[in-house]
Image: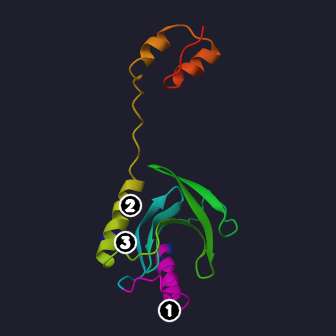
Amino acid sequence: MSESTALNAPGSPETALAAAFRHIAATRMRAMPLCNPALSVEAIGFRDWRNDRVGVLITPWSMNLICLPGPDSRWQPASSGSPHSLPLPSGDYDFLNAQEDAIGAYLSSSLFSPMFEFADMAQARSVAEAVLAEVFTAVEPAAPAVPAEGMTAKLEQPLSRRGFLGALLPGSARKA
């Protein structure tokens, strides 16, 4: 069984998500001019993350990073449209709370909308997979900043609190 098939096995939350959005595409969004007719609905790369499932949902009208709550989820559903920050390996991401009757509460973070820049599903899948690779790549700690030229001399001399803050501003003259 391929990874894609295993992640979207029958009965999985992402399978229910894709089915719900296929229904939305066939009903509420069917005649909407913002839909790209070359695209369909697909759940991409869902994986476990801190008691939840995170992946990308492609639709003809948008591509979203989605968080589906697991049974021991750390977040509690809130009113649709309310913000939620979700820590992922590459940093914190802004999501919105959402609700669909067929799947319940979930978090959604818009990646693309509308979807006219995508020629076909292969291109949309490729972008979704690249997004997930970046989102799930841990950020390495930043190297300590090297003082800018001229800053070293300023920092080597004792400073008052006011002088310290002034030394940090470019082009500032140090006051005694």
Q: Is residue 29 magenta?
A: yes
- Residue 114 x %, y %: 45, 75
Give the CA separation, mark 2 to mark 1.
29 Å
Callout 2: few (<14), some (14-19), or many (20+) C-alpha neighbours within 10 Å?
A: some
Q: Amino acid at mark 1?
A: Ala
> Does the magenta segment cover residue 124?
no
Nearest-to-viewer mark from 2 and 1: 1
Secondary element at image label 1:
loop
Report the number of discs. 3
What scheme was used to colour the molecule? rainbow
Discs 2, 3 touching: Cβ within 8 Å = no
Is 8 or 56 nearer to us in this picture? 56
Query: Which residue corresponds to mark 1?
Result: 31
Q: Is residue 110 left or right of residue 145?
A: right
Residue type of the residue flagged with mark 3: Ala
Residue bearing mark 3? 6
Task: Write down the quadrant of residue 152 in the picture.
Answer: top left
Q: Work out whether residue 1 can be spotted.
A: no
Hey, which quadrant is residue 133 in on the image? bottom left
Instruction: Determine crowd level at label 1: few under 14, some 14-19, many 20+ residues with C-alpha closer than 10 A.
Output: few
Work out whether mark 2 precedes mark 3 in sequence or the reverse, and give the earlier one: 3
User: Magenta residues, as a range?
Assistant: 14-37
Instruction: Of the two numbered discs 3 and 1 on the same chain, state the one appearing first in sequence.
Output: 3
Instruction: Nearest to the eye among marks 3 and 1: give it.
Output: 1
Q: Is residue 32 left or right of residue 3?
A: right
Q: Which residue is mark 2?
A: 131
Q: Are marks 2 and 1 in contact (CB under 8 Å)?
A: no
Which residue occupies the foreground of this view, 174 or 134?
174
Residue at the location (53% across, 23% down)? 168
Horizontally, is 70 left or right of 65 in the view?
A: right
> Does residue 85 lie above or below 68 as drawn?
above
